[in-house]
Image (cartoon, helix red, strand yellow):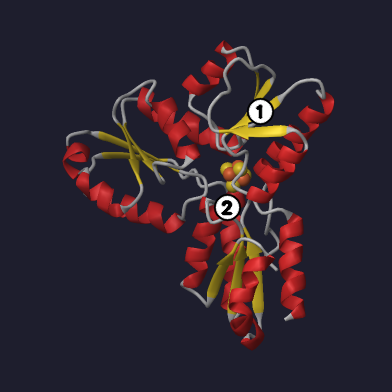
Amino acid sequence: MAQSAGFCYGVKRAVETTKKIKLENTSKKVWVLGELIHNSQVIKELEGLGIQTVDELPENENGICIVRSHGMPPQKIKEMTDKGFEVVDLTCLDVKKVQQKAVQLAQENFLVLILGKPEHPEVVAIKANAQLYSDKVFVIPDLEVLKGLTDEIKSHNRVGIVIQTTQKLDFLQDVIRYLIPLSSELKVFNTICKSTSKRQQEAIELAKNSDLMIVVGSKKSANTTHLAEILSGITNTIHIETQDDLINYKDIIEKSQEIGITAGASTPENVIKNVINQIEKY
Ligand code: SF4
């Protein structure tokens, strides 16, 4: 098993602090706007403790509202305060850094490129922060979209890049390679978080010596999906959410000699343990 499989420090902090807040404020309602982390088992566990996950801020309610680890647009945070909620900001510090770098680029009059999926909550919040200072902010999910912006990029002297914390380094490298001939001033912040780089590196090493890699974590989680994509280029790889999914891969597991296991940053330890137990049974 990869050493750094499972919760990263940002996720651990968000989950533990949210539980602690509820314990210390039993008489108050505690809300999380959007999923605190991308893991349905954890969201259910929080619900069981009386912590409610909602898609929209509830009307005519009160209590404590948590800003999740992915961060939130400043307008949303203001709305929470305006509606009378006490706000606790649990945005991961590494995510905050990306927001700050994007704002810096916007303030310095760079065309801002945010590498990541437009619908990812972290990207939504980074973009909203940068847009407070510039309307030249673009989200780049892939090279095709980047190529579509060639004229816009050429017309701007200064181009700045940040990348969503759990993206792949290869993507950043490809984007830089494309931009170098186009722009006279290119400023790049490699904002992939250290926890993600370490997790990816360890999993790659493990995959080199395994004939099967099992990646455990939510299909909605960007870092888990990226891990599975990276590893499938090295060895046979399957991506599962819980031990129940293993039944579909029983044959391949039984035939494999060396099985490596890793898990995304939002995968709880007990989910990983259950997977290992099930594999041992096979
Ligand atoms: S993956 Fe990185 S950026 Fe995301 S919560 Fe964990 S430490 Fe923070």
Asked whether 261 or 81 is in front, the reply is: 81
Q: Position of residue 28 (x, y in %)?
A: 76, 20
For the C terminus, the quadrant is bottom right
For the N terminus, the quadrant is bottom right
Residue under numbered circle 2: 196
SS at mark 2 in the image: helix
Ligand 1 resides in the quarter of the picture at: top right
Let me know if residue 255 appears in the view. Answer: yes
Dot placed on the residue nearer the N-terminal end, 1 or 2: 1
Residue 60 shown left or right of residue 189 in the figure: right
Q: Position of residue 241 (x, y in %)?
A: 61, 61
Task: Specify the quadrant of the image occupied by residue 131.
Answer: top left
Q: Amino acid at mark 2?
A: Thr
Q: Amino acid at mark 1?
A: Trp
Picture residue at 52% right of the left edge, 69% below the top: 231
Task: Specify the quadrant of the image occupied by residue 35.
Answer: top right
Instruction: Say which mark, if any, is on residue 31.
Output: 1
Picture residue at 47% right of the left edge, 44% below the top: 164
Query: How many discs appear?
Result: 2
